[in-house]
Amino acid sequence: MRRLDNFAIARLAKLAGAPLRRGAGVEVLRKLGDAVKEGEPLLRVYSGTPAESALAEDYATTEKTIIYCA
């Protein structure tokens, strides 16, 4: 993992309900410089409601620059 877009991660967390919903947010599962395999999870998103979960999932799957691995 070479680069994280902090702005995009913050936006993802807000879409998931943070900071208004207790427990909502984003957990980054790997550190910069870690080797990762294709299909390996890099983020875990905690949301406040199913609607916020859907918004966050849509953003995470369409925004391709959240994490850059090479």
Image (cartoon, grey):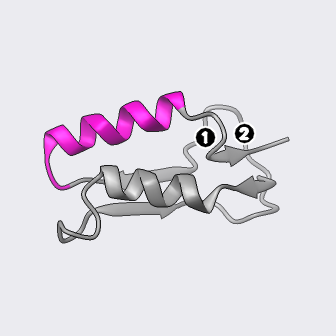
Describe residue 1's horizontal placement relative to residue 25 as left or right.
right
Describe residue 66's horizontal placement relative to residue 18 as left or right.
right
Measuring 46% from the left and 63% from the top, which residue is drawn there? 27
User: Could you tell me how far apart the alpha carbons at marks 1 and 2 are, in whole angstroms?
Assistant: 6 Å
Measuring 61% from the left and 32% from the top, which residue is drawn there? 39
- Asked which quadrant contains residue 19, the reply is bottom left
**Above or below — where is 28 with respect to 38?**
below
**Above or below — where is 69 with respect to 34?**
above
**Magenta stretch holds residue 61:** yes
For label 1, the crowd category at 10 Å Cα-Cα, with few meaning under 14, some 14 to 19 and many 20 or more, is few
Q: Secondary structure at mark 2?
A: loop
Q: Position of residue 34 (x, y in %)?
A: 77, 59
Q: Secondary structure at mark 1?
A: loop
Give, as a three-letter code, the residue at label 1.
Glu
**Which SS type dominates the magenta stretch?**
helix
Residue contact at pointers 1 and 2, CB within 8 angstroms: yes
Measuring 14% from the left and 48% from the top, which residue is drawn there? 49
Q: Out of 39 and 19, give the one closest to the viewer.
A: 19
The residue where tag 1 is placed is: 40
Q: Which residues are magenta?
A: 48-62
Give, as a three-letter code, the residue at label 2.
Lys
For label 2, the crowd category at 10 Å Cα-Cα, with few meaning under 14, some 14 to 19 and many 20 or more, is few
Q: Say which quadrant the C terminus sits in.
A: top right
The residue where tag 2 is placed is: 37
**Magenta stretch holds residue 32:** no
Q: Position of residue 62 (x, y in %)?
A: 51, 28
Describe residue 29's horizontal placement relative to residue 1 as left or right.
left
Q: Out of 4 and 69, give the one closest to the viewer.
A: 4
